[in-house]
Amino acid sequence: NDEQSNNGSNNNNNNPKVVEFYDPKCGACQAFKSNYIEIAKKVQSLKPNVEFYGVSCELYRNICDKYGPPSVPKIFAFPDGARVEPDDGIEVP
């Protein structure tokens, strides 16, 4: 799911969320894309309530800037998906 309506603040549910921040012009991001999709499919087959998102830092720079230095791809997990703010997320190395 590409980031469209969520501005990085509150969500309508408490489902855990995983967010990839990427730049469409980034070679590493393009190389990682298929892995991210595969991981999402595997996790959702076991835990269907986990939601996966992709946020384009080219389109949503203001959101990406909230999550630290502009290195992409960057993954954040939000175990309690009710709040999707930098302080609530865990950066996945």
Image (spheres, grey):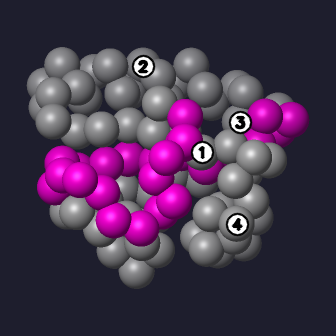
- Structural crowding at the residue carrying mark 2, measured as other residues with C-alpha within 10 Å and reported as few (<14), some (14–19) or many (≥20): few
Disc 4 crowd, CA 10 A, few/some/many (<14, 14-19, 20+): few
Over which residues does the magenta segment extend?
2-26
| Callout 3 amino acid | Cys
Residue nearest the viewer, comparing 9 with 79: 9
Q: Label 2: state its secondary structure.
A: helix
Q: Which residue carries the number 2 mark?
A: 38
Is there CB contact under 8 Å for labels 2 and 3? no
Front: mark 4 or 3: 4
What type is the residue that disc 2 sits on? Glu
Nearer-the-camera pick, 22 or 4:
4
Neighbourhood count class around disc 1 (C-alpha, 10 Å): few under 14, some 14–19, many 20 upward: many
Instruction: Classify 66 as above or below 7.
Output: below
Residue 76 shown in magenta:
no
Q: CA distance from mark 2 to mark 4?
A: 28 Å
**Mark-to-mark CA distance, 2 and 1:** 17 Å
**Quick one: which residue is furthest to the bottom in this view?**
87
Residue beneath disc 4: 62
Dot 2 or dot 1, earlier in sequence: 2
Q: Which mark is residue 55?
A: 1
Q: Which mark is residue 88?
A: none
Quarter occupied by residue 78: bottom left
Where residue 30 sits in the image (x, y, percent)? 73, 27
Q: Is 19 a magenta residue?
A: yes
- Report the amino acid beneath label 4: Asn
Where is residue 60? Give x, y as percent: 70, 53
Q: Which residue is mark 3?
A: 29
Which numbered disc, 3 or 1, marks the residue closer to the eye?
1
Which numbered disc, 4 or 1, marks the residue that appears first in the sequence? 1
For the residues labelled 4 and 3, the Cα–Cα distance comes to 19 Å
Residue displayed at 30% across by 38% down: 51
